[in-house]
Amino acid sequence: MKKIILCALFLCAYTLTNAQSRAIGTFELTPFLGSSSSNYNFDGKTSSANSPINSVTFGIDGDYYFNNRWSIRSGLLIQTMGSEYNRITEKLNYLTIPINANWHFGSSRKWNLNFGPSIGFLMSAKANDTDINNLVNPTQYGLNFGIGYRIEIQKNIGILIDYQGMSGSSDISKASGNLTNVYSTFDVGCVFKL
């Protein structure tokens, strides 16, 4: 019984110590890889005639902590967005920069909720194998949101498992109005506390 109590006390002390380790000025880098899905919204609604496309997403995020509850999260993401309609698959590849407020919660601050704007720069656009860069706006603005959980491996290394979503707020097409991207991804990353 004494061993169980001592183990429980040790785990509580370890958790509390790690919860307080993210002080002002702490910076973390998280390279990640994930599986994403995207589709188009027409006038704010997803058409049932379109099918989502699935792809791989990757990038690197950085978190700068103001205290053990709040940080600012940004990074560089490579994202493939688009849709499929009548056997035509449109793939729009973006380099995206999000700027999210990140709230860390739970007794050990291992959970996080993040939200904020993003800007995406078009790298390429194809319909099947045809280049459609001239039909797509070169920048995309969106609103991001997400939730994640961090698993501590060592004092300065962890694993982050999270879900991120993005709702486009700018028209992606030069020709038609109110065509935006909707995007979601499930990611796994390695957190390095610098």
Image (cartoon, rainbow, N blue to C red):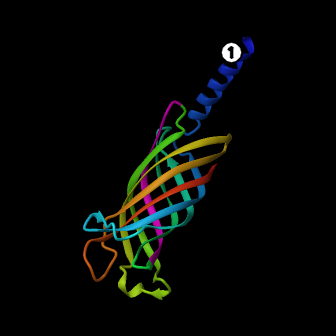
Count of number-bearing discs: 1
Q: Eyeballing the image, is 87 above or below 164?
A: below
Q: What amino acid is found at the position of numbered circle 1 in the picture?
A: Ile
Tell me which corner region of the image, top left, top right, bottom left or bottom right, holds residue 142.
bottom left
Q: Is residue 98 magenta?
A: yes
Q: Eyeballing the image, is 4 above or below 42?
A: above
Tell me which corner region of the image, top left, top right, bottom left or bottom right, holds residue 99.
bottom left
Tell me which corner region of the image, top left, top right, bottom left or bottom right, holds residue 88.
bottom left
Residue 22, x across and y down, in percent:
56, 40
Q: Is residue 175 visible?
A: yes
Q: Residue 40 or 26: which is nearer the viewer?
A: 40
| Type of secondary structure dominating the magenta stretch | strand
- Residue at the extreme right: 3
Q: Residue 123 or 192: which is nearer the viewer?
A: 123
Q: Quadrant of the N terminus?
A: top right
Q: Residue at x 62, y 41 (%)?
A: 151
Q: Residue at x 52, y 50 (%)?
A: 162
Q: Residue 54 or 72: which is nearer the viewer?
A: 54
Kind of element beneath mark 1: helix
Q: Is residue 42 left or right of residue 26?
A: left
Q: Residue at x 43, y 67 (%)?
A: 52
Residue 44, x across and y down, in percent:
27, 64
Q: Eyeballing the image, is 149 above or below 176?
A: above
Q: Residue at x 45, y 78 (%)?
A: 89
Q: Which residue is tagged 1?
A: 5
Residue 94, x across and y down, in percent:
47, 72
Q: Eyeballing the image, is 105 above or below 57?
A: above
10 Å crowding of disc 1: few (<14), some (14-19), many (20+): few
Q: Please provide the residue range marked out in magenta.
A: 90-107
Q: Is residue 41 magenta?
A: no
- Residue at the extreme top: 1
Q: Is residue 20 visible?
A: no
